[in-house]
Image: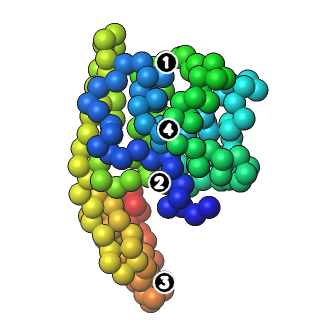
Amino acid sequence: MNKEQIKKAFVSDVNNIGDEAYNNQDWYQEDEQRLRYILATFDWDEQNQYKNCIKFDVKDKYQINDEQKLSELINMNYDQLFEYVEDNELDWKGDDYEHICQYLDFMNGWQDEIEFGGTDMQNPDCMTIDKRSRQWNVDEESGFKSENKFEVAYQILMDYFEDLPEETRHEVDERLKAVDL
């Protein structure tokens, strides 16, 4: 399985993320990507055969632990996923807002369009899901991107750092250290 297949299976369309959320189980059951994610990542003793079939790391990194189980999970449609949750009486209780924010963080690492965050965490009625459009600065040559243009500039400088004469490299290094870079 490649990265695009993983993304399609686990990353919700940004338009499917509403402005508010309350109960994490209801929220996760709103679309098949979130259901797949919860089945692959949430710990229910031995009731869930898909737990840890894939492990998601920071940003868009992952490790496949059981390709057969992952393939089964990816090929299930929404009705099959929902039925699996019902048949196995899976219930994920806990800190609703915190649990929802875990998926929002996951979304932030797997798509570039919108940055999501949760606020109003003390509100017992619902939390607010904040959305911010991302504006990327991209170095076309290396593909490095950041919302901070100075970070992109720094990466470009580092691409040429080794090509500088030794004395100039030392000077640049000292100057960058002086500004905590």
Residue 31 percent location from the top left of the image: 43, 36
Q: Earlier in the sequence, mark 3 or mark 1?
A: 1
Residue 133 percent location from the top left of the image: 23, 49
Which numbered tag is attached to residue 95?
1
SS for callout 2: helix
- Viewer-nearest of discs 3 and 1: 1
Which residue: 26% across, 53% down? 134
Which quadrant of the figure contains the C terminus? bottom left
Q: CA distance from mark 3 to mark 1?
A: 49 Å
SS for callout 3: loop
Residue 21 percent location from the top left of the image: 34, 24
Dot 2 amino acid type? Lys
Instruction: Look at mark 3 in the image and give the residue it sits on.
Output: 162
Q: Earlier in the sequence, mark 3 or mark 4?
A: 4
Q: Earlier in the sequence, mark 3 or mark 2?
A: 2
Q: Can the viewer see residue 138 in this picture?
A: yes
Q: CA distance from mark 1 to mark 2?
A: 27 Å
Which numbered tag is attached to residue 8?
2
- Picture layout, residue 118 above or below residue 8: above
Which residue: 56% across, 35% down? 81
- Viewer-nearest of discs 3 and 2: 2
Q: CA distance from mark 3 to mark 2?
A: 39 Å
Outermost residue on the right side: it is 46
Dot 4 amino acid type? Tyr
Instruction: Look at mark 4 in the image and give the residue it sits on.
Output: 78
* Left-right relation of 138 to 105: left
Q: Earlier in the sequence, mark 4 or mark 1?
A: 4
Disc 1 crowd rating (10 Å Cα; few below 14, some 14-19, many 20+) is few
Which residue: 66% across, 23% down? 88
Disc 4 crowd rating (10 Å Cα; few below 14, some 14-19, many 20+) is some
SS for callout 4: helix
